[in-house]
Image (spheres, helix red, strand yellow):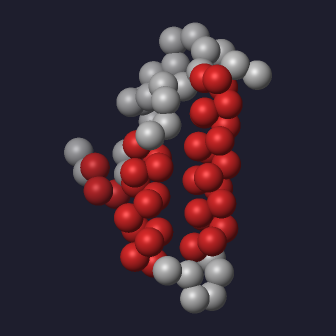
Amino acid sequence: MCPQYEDFHRTVLMLGDIALYAERPGADLDFIDAISPALAASLPEPLPGMFPPGYDFNDGPDYPHQGH
């Protein structure tokens, strides 16, 4: 597996691990609040072929905080 794929997969796995950890009794919520955004921000650009050609990341449902 090429380094770009390895980095992406490792980061996604860590995000999954921290999500599971957050559900455990006694989880350190301050740690989760500090680490989760930084980990998500470290994700590289989506890998080629992950999304169909022409996929628009900005197209989708309006979320409550986005009111138009």
User: Does 3 sit above or below residue 32?
Assistant: above
Residue 57, percent from left and from top: 44, 28
Residue at the image position 48 percent from the left and 25 percent from the top: 45
Residue at the image position 60 percent from the left and 33 percent from the top: 7
Residue 14, percent from left and from top: 62, 52
Residue 44, percent from left and from top: 49, 30
Q: Quadrant of residue 12?
A: top right
Residue 6, percent from left and from top: 67, 31
Describe residue 5's horizontal placement relative to residue 28 as left or right: right
Q: Nearer the viewer, residue 47 or 65?
A: 47
Quarter of the N terminus within the rendering = top right
Residue at the image position 49 percent from the left and 37 percent from the top: 43
Describe residue 44's horizontal placement relative to residue 26 as left or right: left
Number of marks in the image? 0
The answer to whether residue 52 is seen in the rendering is no
User: Does 62 sit above or below residue 37?
Assistant: above
The answer to whether residue 60 is seen in the rendering is yes
Outermost residue toward the left in this view: 68
Residue at the image position 44 percent from the left and 60 percent from the top: 35
Outermost residue toward the top in this view: 53
Q: Quadrant of residue 5?
A: top right
Q: Quadrant of residue 23?
A: bottom right
Outermost residue toward the right in this view: 1
Outermost residue toward the front in this view: 3
Quarter of the C terminus within the rendering = top left
